[in-house]
Each structure stands twice: as structure tokens, then as C-alpha cells.
Amino acid sequence: MSGRVGERSILIVEDEKVVADTLGQILASHGYEIRVVYSAEDAVETIANWSPNLAILDVMLPKMNGIEFAVVLKENLPDCHVLLFSGQPSVEALMQKARNEGHDFEILAKPVHPTVMLDAISTLLSPEGPDHAHQA
């Protein structure tokens, strides 16, 4: 079925190619359908033709950052889960700005161990959905 995506499709947006490609290989080996892009701008083009169930986004991307793309993604694909990750302590201000605008996203700190990432993905894509008990 062309264009139709299963429940295990993941878009990875990460400008560090080694990190992006490695994460893509790990997830593909666990049975996920993966698309890897290296900028938010490429991700915008990708979601025009493909609807993932989950997007894993680096926060610190070159032009449009991951949080800005997450907002665009949720406007276009409201059922797509978002998982942000970052190695920059400075992203808290960006996260707070997004929360103030009504956007609350999961975030993991880099480096992320593959099992931590897989557990987070499994939780987000489970039929029960993510646990929202942590809302502030």
C-alpha cells in the first residue's frame, strides 16, 4: 500500500549524520520503518509525502530548531508523537517557551543509550499511549 504507513514508522531529524544514521540502524534492526533526514527543512519535505507515527528530533538543528519543527509537525500531523533529544543544557528556555505556547513535548538528554530510546519509543507508540501523569 503506497503512502500508507504502519504503526511503527519513525522519522529521525538529527544534523549529526553519524548519530542520525546509527539511531536509524538501531531502530530499523528492531523492526521500525525509518526515514532519516539531517535538517528540519528536509523533514518538512518528507512529511509532505509520508506520515510517521513518531518523530525523533534533535532540538539544536542548524536553521529551524527541533521544537519549531515539532510545532509544525503537530499542526500537520496531530497524531504523530514527538520525542525530542538534546545535548545542550540551554534548551530549557526553548522548551519553556513551547510550553507557554501550549506545546508539551517529551525530551531525552544526549547521549541517549539505545535501550532508553527504545523504551521511550515503545511507550509513545503503545496502544495505551504515553502516560500523561507527569503533566505540570
Image: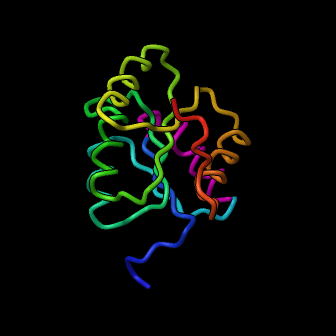
Q: Can you tell which quarter of the image residue 64 is in?
A: top left
Q: Main secondary structure of the magenta part?
A: helix
Residue drawn where x is 55% and y is 68% of the image: 7
Whole-percent x, y for residue 30 in the image: 69, 59
**Front position in the image: 97 or 46:** 97
**Residue sitting farthest toward the right:** 115
Residue drawn where x is 57% and y is 44% of the image: 132
Q: Can you tell which quarter of the image residue 108 is in?
A: top right
- Image vertical order of residue 65 relative to residue 45, above or below: above
**Front position in the image: 44 or 107:** 107
Residue drawn where x is 55% and y is 37% of the image: 19
Q: How many marks?
A: 0
**Front position in the image: 74 or 40:** 74
Whole-percent x, y for residue 92 in the image: 44, 19
Whole-percent x, y for residue 104 in the image: 43, 37
Left or right, residue 98 beside residue 56: left
81 is within the stretch colored magenta: no
Left or right, residue 46 beside residue 21: left
23 is within the stretch colored magenta: yes
Name the quadrant of the N terminus: bottom left
Stretch in magenta: 14-29
Whole-percent x, y for residue 56 in the image: 49, 45
**Residue sitting farthest toward the top:** 90
- Image vertical order of residue 28 relative to residue 64, above or below: below
Left or right, residue 81 beside residue 49: right
- Image vertical order of residue 28 relative to residue 65, above or below: below
